[in-house]
Image (cartoon, helix red, strand yellow):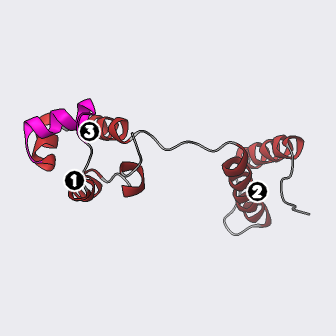
Amino acid sequence: MLRPIKNEQQYENTLERIYMLMQKEIKVDSKESDELEILSILTKEYENEHYPVPSPNPLEAIKFRLDQMNMSEAELSEILGGRSRKSEILSGKRKLSLSMIRKLAEKLNIPAGVLIQAY
């Protein structure tokens, strides 16, 4: 019977069971595939509560996304409204405005929640 994960030992046991299930060739909509899905959900909830991942710094998120998308800082300047503004933002001398956050969220697909954090 599946139960919520309440402690570290149960968490470790669940991870082992997930690993065992993932080694099998499970058929879609089988009892084992349902078990794997439910265990994954329970594990995710436990990890979110006990091992939360902090949101990235907005400036680091922008730099990381530029690198991921193979974009240049010149292209970022176009989004932010000029080279000097881009430099001020990336150096931390100027904060992102609401319109900049909207543009960055749209063009770079960075969640607005990450961009509005204090830095």
Query: Of circles 1 and 3, which is in front?
Result: 1
- Residue marked by disc 3: 66
- Residue marked by disc 2: 39
Residue 14 x %, y %: 82, 47
Q: Amino acid at mark 3?
A: Leu
Query: Of circles 2 and 1, which is in front?
Result: 1
Q: Look at the numbered disc 3 and give the secondary structure of its residue.
A: helix
Name the quadrant of the C terminus: top left
Judge the density around disc 3: few (<14), some (14-19), many (≥20) Cα neighbours within 10 Å. Answer: some
Q: Amino acid at mark 2?
A: Leu
- As for residue 83 lying within the magenta part, the answer is yes
* Residue in the image at 41% along x and 50% along y: 114
Q: Look at the numbered disc 2 and give the secondary structure of its residue.
A: helix
- Residue marked by disc 1: 100
- The span from disc 2 to disc 3 (Cα, nearest Å) is 35 Å
Query: Splitting the image into 4 quarters, where does residue 15 fall?
Result: top right
Instruction: Give the magenta range.
Output: 81-94
Residue placed furthest toward the right: 1
* Residue in the image at 29% along x and 56% along y: 105
Please tell me whether the stretch drawn in magenta is mainly helix, strand or loop.
helix
Horizontal side of residue 80 vs 58, given as left or right: left
